[in-house]
Amino acid sequence: MAIVKSGFSVLLSFLIAGISTYFVFEQLAKLSAKQPEKGSFCAYARKAFGKWAGFSNGWV
């Protein structure tokens, strides 16, 4: 239905979202392999930028 209404642009949007998701996954995998610890992005943000960054990243 969305392709009928908007045409090629919806496919382009899904492609951009998929590529962006892949890049985020790739970077998180590299961080996890280099520094294995619990907490995902929260732990990495806290380690790099301080407690407030880890807390706010967790809530976002």
Image (cartoon, helix red, strand yellow):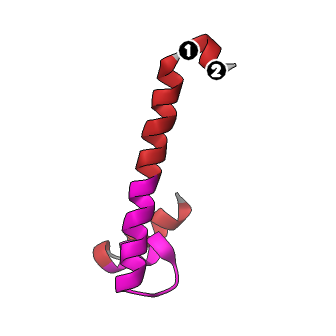
Task: Give the percent coordinates (x, y) of residue 13.
Answer: 48, 31
From the viewer's perspective, is 51 left or right of 58?
left
Q: Amino acid at mark 1?
A: Ser
Callout 1 touching callout 2 (CB < 8 Å): yes
Q: Amino acid at mark 2?
A: Ala
Residue found at x 48% / y 45%: 18
Q: Give the number of the disc on residue 2.
A: 2
Q: CA distance from mark 1 to mark 2?
A: 6 Å
Q: Secondary structure at mark 2?
A: helix
Q: Is residue 6 above or below residue 10?
A: above
Task: Give the labeled residue for mark 1.
Answer: 6
Name the dominant secondary structure of the magenta segment: helix
Residue 51 visible in image = no
Graded by Cα atoms within 10 Å as few (under 14), some (14 to 19) or many (20 or more), the crowding at tag 1 reads few
Residue 41 covered by magenta stretch: yes
Q: Which residues are magenta?
A: 22-47
**Residue 35, quarter of picture:** bottom left
